[in-house]
Image (tube, grey):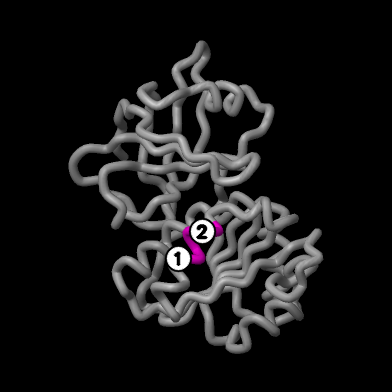
Amino acid sequence: MKELEAKIKEIIPMTHNVTSFRVEAEGEIEFKAGQFLQVVLKTMPELKRYLSISNSPTEKGYLEFTKKITESDFCRTLKNLKPGDYLKIRYPFGKFTLDESFYKIAFLSGGIGITPIRSIAKYVVDKNLSTDIVLLYANRTVEDIAFKYDFDQMRKQCPRLKVIHVLSESREAVEYKSGRINAQIIKDSISDYSERKFYLCGPPAMVEAMKNILVTELAVAETSIITENFQGY
């Protein structure tokens, strides 16, 4: 594990309630796409959170974490920070990482759970890996989709990346799937689902529900499902 006093380089609003923070990181930054870090804010007492790293190891010169801004003490302090302010970073943690031995993978995600998936997908695209990816990403509305521009750009670069947005409050059925991720949407969107390794990331209740659908309704082996007990929610 490494620890650094990091200066905020850039603060980027992603949606109406999700913000990315980039901190300067000189030299070689060693982490795997999909891992997470700990952010420590200088308060009395210290405020700490574990947050996924949302940039890829291929994106040099900074570490980026992305947070849904709530009314917690941590978020109230975080959103008052400005470029040039310092915070403490400890990294890397976690095993929610790409296994390049699997040619076909699928991501099921919701809300801010997209952050490690953005990191992995960007790594695959930048490295021009042969990995075939399907992402089902659940949100309430179009305005809630984090990293939409990033994924749109990655799709243009990589035909092996397929992204399907599932919106629970959408009336735009032509471009987006309406409702919630369920067995039928998985079968319709991922016809070869039985051949894929599944990565699940999102709020704990959603992850558990998605795992149950895969195992009990679609007969996906538990050994083909990757999750991580993550404290970032």
Q: Label 1 belongs to which residue? A: 153
Q: In which quarter of the image is the C terminus?
A: top right
Q: Where is residue 8 in the image (x, y as percent from the top left)?
A: 37, 30
Q: In which quarter of the image is the N terminus?
A: top left
Left-right relation of 83 to 215: left
Type of the residue with mark 2? Tyr
227 relative to 20, above or below: below
Question: Callout 1 environment at 10 Å: few (<14), some (14 to 19), or many (20+)?
Answer: few
Which segment is the magenta one?
Answer: 148-153
Q: Label 2 belongs to which residue? A: 149
104 relative to 206, above or below: below
Q: What element carries label 1?
A: helix
Q: Position of residue 146 (x, y in %)?
A: 58, 52
Given contact means CB atoms under 8 Å apart, are the residues at marks 2 and 1 in contact? yes
Residue 17's image quarter? top right
Q: How far apart are marks 2 and 1 (CA)?
A: 6 Å
Question: Callout 2 environment at 10 Å: few (<14), some (14 to 19), or many (20+)?
Answer: few
Q: Is mark 2 on a helix, strand or loop?
A: helix
Left-right relation of 193 to 48: right
Left-right relation of 192 to 127: right
Q: Does the magenta stretch include residue 58?
A: no
**Identity of the residue drawn at 37% across and 32% down:** 89
204 relative to 197, above or below: above
Q: Position of residue 188 (x, y in %)?
A: 70, 84
Q: Position of residue 186 (x, y in %)?
A: 68, 78
